[in-house]
Amino acid sequence: MKKTMLAACFILVSGTAFAQQAAQADPATVDRYVQSMWAKASPEWKARIVQDETQAECSAARNTPGPAQFEKIVAREKAGVVFPADGTVLGDWKSGAKVANTGTGGQFSDGPDTYVGGNCYACHQMAPGELSYGTLGPSLTGYGKARNFSAEAAKAAYAKIYNAQSVMACSQMPRFGHNRFLTEQQIKDVTAFLFDPESPVNK
Amino acid sequence: MTRMKIHRIGAALVTVLALSAPALAQATDADKEIERYRAMINDPMANPGYLAVDRGEVLWSTRRGARNVSLEGCDLGEGVGKLEGAFAKLPRFFKDADRVMDLEQRLLWCMQKVQELDTADVIKRRFGGPGVDSDMQDLVAFIANKSNGMAYQPQLSHPKEQEMLAVGEALFHRRAGVNDFSCTTCHGEDARRIRLQALPNFSKPGKDAQDTMGSWPTYRVSQSQLRTMQHRLWDCYRQMRHPIPEYGSDGITALTVYMVTMARGGEITVPSIKR
């Protein structure tokens, strides 16, 4: 909560500098630009620029929703989280390592058969041996170990990967399960990568 | 310089990058290493981007189109044929077109209106590649270079320029697509990295935006091409898992207006050279 407040202050300060220069754009005008920018995209691709409620609300709130809106978004996103039917959230950590380390998939430069990865390392530190990690998200090194490998914490992690906004409204993290970007099996594998005692994340 | 020689320089630069990458991961002061590398390759004689500048100079004065005239009759905002400082004030509103245009939109407009050139081929070659020279990349390199040593002066007095800025700011924050990404995902905070790549913060005015905008267009060693901001934003949307943005569309120009506004006062030193 404190972090959210700090983030709010930061954005307010930087927002002020902008506000001195221009008023916020009228949504209909923005949409006109969006439509012309992707006028030639195929219907399947064009569907991607249509915002869902959460994307639209977070964009308008500059990712800093007020307390009531925060709760509303979390409730909405939480309702859509689907846990595995077999009751287990842990897959194969070795496969999870591949998902975490692969950044291809879903780009207009990718072929239809391109492997779709989660690209976790783009933003997070994970296994300490992998030095090429980003800092947009918190370090996840020792994640499972720090939570005593508890089943409850693993389930929470699965839910967070499935839909980060079911926990934190307007989180910058993609809603991997919600958006059908990763498969259920891939999310289980990444959860195992975080929670298996044998995973390098916990070594 | 021969083409062969350029390729060799490019290959050497890639090697330098490849060799320095693992070292950077462990470096206590990676920024200093990068600075040292930049200084090393920032010599105009070693920057293949200057070949694009030379080609652009030729293109600017080449007679083309149905009217068989050069682009010297084109007004980039500072007067007909005047190049010095034009890039520092773009994008801007053009009364004759009744639109705000970035440099590439304006060049296309001048090709169509001044030269009466069919721009289909120019647009097809908007981004250069192996065996494909891009007139637009070359012209942008040449024209932007004529603003070297000058500061970005965003033009915001016309209502349409103000609209562009407001829309650009909204687009910067607009989340969409299969990964819920917006520009802010990567460029909304100070001192962040994606993998090992440092990410400039464009959500506020200042040094990050000034340094970045002040060094575009740039020669991309990894692509062996002089790249413009149109290409950079195309690549951003690719990584954001958005559809291909239309070349020269007003949305790209709006984002550019927003970014030059964040970069106000930033000194232009182009073409630079980047990984």
Image (cartoon, coloured by chain):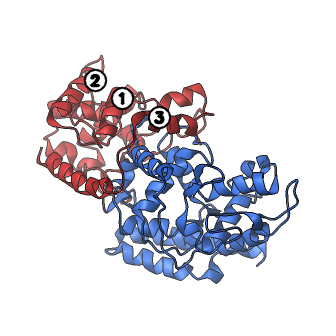
In this rendering, the answer to whether B211 lies above or below B195 is below
Q: Nearer the viewer, residue A142 or B197?
A: B197
Q: Are marks 1 and 3 in contact (CB under 8 Å)?
A: no
In this rendering, the answer to whether B199 lies above or below A97 is below
As measured in the structure, the alpha-carbon distance from the residue carrying label 3 to the one carrying label 2 is: 30 Å
Q: Amino acid at mark 1?
A: Gly
Instruction: Tell me which chain the residue with mark 1 is part of.
Output: A
Q: Is residue A91 visible?
A: no
Instruction: Tell me which chain the residue with mark 2 is part of.
Output: A
Count of marks placed on residues = 3
Residue at 44% across, 51% down = B162
Q: Which residue does the numbered mark 1 point to in the structure image?
A: A177
Mark 2 Cα-neighbour bin, 10 Å: few <14, some 14–19, many ≥20:
some
Find numbered disc 2 in the image and state the secondary structure of the residue it sits on. Answer: loop
Q: Position of residue B259 (x, y in %)?
A: 45, 58
Mark 1 Cα-neighbour bin, 10 Å: few <14, some 14–19, many ≥20:
many
Find numbered disc 3 in the image and state the secondary structure of the residue it sits on. Answer: helix
Q: Is residue A62 visible?
A: yes
Which corner quadrant of the image does residue B62 belong to? bottom right
Of marks 1 and 3, which one's residue comes earlier in the chain? 3
Q: Which residue does the numbered mark 2 point to in the structure image?
A: A81
Disc number lying in front (1 or 3): 3
Number of the label disc, if any, that sits on residue A31: 3
- Along the horizontal axis of the image, is A12 left or right of B64? left
Residue at 22% across, 56% down = A13
**Tell me, what hue is chain B?**
blue
Q: Amino acid at mark 3?
A: Asp
**Tell me, what hue is chain A?**
red
